Image (cartoon, rainbow, N blue to C red):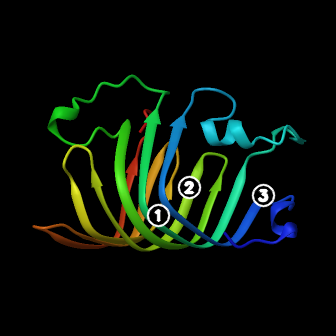
Amino acid sequence: ARFSLKGLLSDDGIQLSRAEVHDALICLVNENNEYKSNLARAFSSGKKKEGGNNPLTVIVKRARLENVEFRMVNATKENGTDSRYGVNWNNIDLILNAEAKAIKYSDGTFSGQFNHIDFSEHCGLEIDELSCKLEYSETLLSFEDLFLKDKNTSLKLKELSFSMDDNQ
């Protein structure tokens, strides 16, 4: 990682100009509490902003991931998906390689510009190429300028959004 002390100690959160991760495990757990995720709970500064907690903010200008296992567990909902028949979106477990820029995580929302991603999910799904601008939160998954390619399919979309709000 390349960073400055000013970027690490900023009131705007942790800022890295470049990060590379190799052969790692990242586990994100969405929690049903005041922090919303295990990362926000672990990195909470304990400082209070007016009107509530100071959310964890991490900004990475450029990132490269190689052979990274990413697990996302949604502990806020019951695990009702039968994972024998495709991806269990409440408990994702994948191995990925990626190159990205303008990555931001703040208050449960993750966004970034992904120039290249390839991955395999434990259910058998394999993506050879994925690029897009992405935003993910507890209630929204949004892709812009999406390109997706697997062994049988090539897909290009200007915009694709999924609402995960139970009220919509």
Look at the picture and state if 112 lies above or below 28. below
Look at the picture and state if 161 lies above or below 51. below
Compute the Cα span from label 1 to label 2: 8 Å
* Whole-percent x, y for residue 39 in the image: 63, 42
Residue to which mark 3 is pinned: 13
Quadrant the N terminus occupies: bottom right
Q: Is residue 28 visible?
A: yes
In the rendered structure, the answer to whether residue 37 lies left or right of residue 23 reads right
Query: In the image, which is nearer the foreground, mark 1 or mark 3?
Result: 3
The residue positioned 62% from the left and 35% from the top of the image is 36
**Closer-to-camera residue (31/137):** 31
* Whole-percent x, y for residue 58 in the image: 69, 58
* Residue contact between numbered discs 1 and 2, judged by CB atoms under 8 Å: yes
Q: Amino acid at mark 2?
A: Phe
Q: Which numbered marker is on residue 134?
A: 1
Compute the Cα span from label 1 to label 3: 20 Å
In the rendered structure, the answer to whether residue 93 lies left or right of residue 151 reads right
* Whole-percent x, y for residue 109 in the image: 58, 51
Q: Amino acid at mark 1?
A: Leu
Which residue is farthest left? 152
| Element at label 1 | strand
The residue positioned 43% from the left and 68% from the top of the image is 98
| Element at label 3 | loop
Q: Which numbered marker is on residue 7?
A: none
